[in-house]
């Protein structure tokens, strides 16, 4: 009987992962769709690269401001219900952007789509309470496959469907899907006690319910590993935003690719990028089982090799399309190594009841820098070209991330041991 219940719980947690994967896939499709639609949107409103960058930055600024608020709410209330609300907001605000008729109105409505963009910390912490620490990076890598796949789906919608339906109707479709996913999460995802999957609580049926406390929230700043996580977060998202929102236009206008060539080039590259999330997560879990430094080491290798291959790719002559494709594929493989491992690293050193807050602060700092990345890239593009903007913003950011990861290596061991000691102490009280 007990074995059946354990098996049922293990099966159910994968159902939750499947629902969250669908949520993230369609949400990322909606969020990233604006990049491939840059051309028709810019033409309709008659705007420059810089003005388009402001459109992206508006949503990033809103999302950045709301991260601490979402984090606090997730640590205080039921995360599943809040995720359902976030999905409802996604659908509603996307519809608003679809009906905007002026550039100013479009900037405002696209900014409103940033409200739900800061909802992921609750998703990740809920998943953390279903899966043990040694397996989390793989699960996060699997979930994060949805991001490049969503980008690929958005690319297909933009290049193959939007020319016939129009970019506004595409937004109506993706917004409607957000409303449907909201209902799915509300009725099918159950809440899990915070800290349930920590190894110290294995075999304990009734465990203490951990809730948010300001004391623990302040204590997260005492974890020196988090200082470097925050610093790398500030720099690390710059390349993603620049490449996401400018690379399609770069291929078309500066490398001479037509729409079919863009799709045939970017389709496989995005699939390789998707694989990189899972490979990075798998390697991170493998390395973590051998040393607490493992996830940081994998992350640092990822940003270093990603920077090297991007540099080589953008220096490739325009006519050498085959070489360019290979180098961009290698860039795509290593780029996402950090993503699942940074999330797991936060949960490796922070107590369960403030993990959403910690993750939200990390994303707040990330987006605090990344919100300016599209505008910065737009300014450099207008002054020089898009290739120069993509190259220098990305290389500079990744070089800084590599240095910050090296700093984290000095403190991760002690911070992981400290958390395990706290969990063991709490579990001992519950067993008493």
Image (cartoon, rainbow, N blue to C red):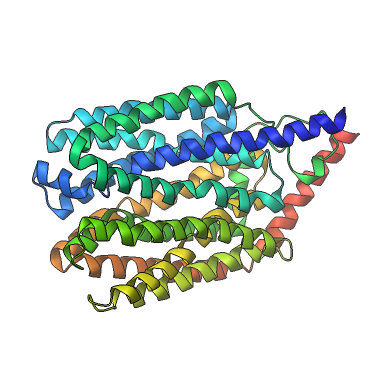
Left or right, 156 with respect to 274, comes to left
On screen, 308 above or below 91? below
Q: Which quarter of the figure has residue 111?
A: top left
Considering depth in this image, is 347 or 81 the residue closer to the camera?
A: 81
Residue in the picture at 89% in, 35% down: 431
Left or right, 55 with respect to 351, comes to left
Left or right, 124 with respect to 238, comes to right
Q: Position of residue 231 (x, y in %)?
A: 47, 60
Residue in the picture at 25% in, 48% down: 159
Q: Which quarter of the figure has residue 218?
A: top right
For this orientation, the residue located farthest to the left is 46
Q: Position of residue 332 (x, y in %)?
A: 43, 64
Q: Where is residue 316 in the image (x, y as percent from the top left)?
A: 29, 78
Q: Quadrant of the C terminus?
A: top right
On screen, 244 above or below 182? below
Residue in the picture at 25% in, 41% down: 161
Considering depth in this image, is 53 or 28 the residue closer to the camera?
A: 28
């Amino acid at each position: 009987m007990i074995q059946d219940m354990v098996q049922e719980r293990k099966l159910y947690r994968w159902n939750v992962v499947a629902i969250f994967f669908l949520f993230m896939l369609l949400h990322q499709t909606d969020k990233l769709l604006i990049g491939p639609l840059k051309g028709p949107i810019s033409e309709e409103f008659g705007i420059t690269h810089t003005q388009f960058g402001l459109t992206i930055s508006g949503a990033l600024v809103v999302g950045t401001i709301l991260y601490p608020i979402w984090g606090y709410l997730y640590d205080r209330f039921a995360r599943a219900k809040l995720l359902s609300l976030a999905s409802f907001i996604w659908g509603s605000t996307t519809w608003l952007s679809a009906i905007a008729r002026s550039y100013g109105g479009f900037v405002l409505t696209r900014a409103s789509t940033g409200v739900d963009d800061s909802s992921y910390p609750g998703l990740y912490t809920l998943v953390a309470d279903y899966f043990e620490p040694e397996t989390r990076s793989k699960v996060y890598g699997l979930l994060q496959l949805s991001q490049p796949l969503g980008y690929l789906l958005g690319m297909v919608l933009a290049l193959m469907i939007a020319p016939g339906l129009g970019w506004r109707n595409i937004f109506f479709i993706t917004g409607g899907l957000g409303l449907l996913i909201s209902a799915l999460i509300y009725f099918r995802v159950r809440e899990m006690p915070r800290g349930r999957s920590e190894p110290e609580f294995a075999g304990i049926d009734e465990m203490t319910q951990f809730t948010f406390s300001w004391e623990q929230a302040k204590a997260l700043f005492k974890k020196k590993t988090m200082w470097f996580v925050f610093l790398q977060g500030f720099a690390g998202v710059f390349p993603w935003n620049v490449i996401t929102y400018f690379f399609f236009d770069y291929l078309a206008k500066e490398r001479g690719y037509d729409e079919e060539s863009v799709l045939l080039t970017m389709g496989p590259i995005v699939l390789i990028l998707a694989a990189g999330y899972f490979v990075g997560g798998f390697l991170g879990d493998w390395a973590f089982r051998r040393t607490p430094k493992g996830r940081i080491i994998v992350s640092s290798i990822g940003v270093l090799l990603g920077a090297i291959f991007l540099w080589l790719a953008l220096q490739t002559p325009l006519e050498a399309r085959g070489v360019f494709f290979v180098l961009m594929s290698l860039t795509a493989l290593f780029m996402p190594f950090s993503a699942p491992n940074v999330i797991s690293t936060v949960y490796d050193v922070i107590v369960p009841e403030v993990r959403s807050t910690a993750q939200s602060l990390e994303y707040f700092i990330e987006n605090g820098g990344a919100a300016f990345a599209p505008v910065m890239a737009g300014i450099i593009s207008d002054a020089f070209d898009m290739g120069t903007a993509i190259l220098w913003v990305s290389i500079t950011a990744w070089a800084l991330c590599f240095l910050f990861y090296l700093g984290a290596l000095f403190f991760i061991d002690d911070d992981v041991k400290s958390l395990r000691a706290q969990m063991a102490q709490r579990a001992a009280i519950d067993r008493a």
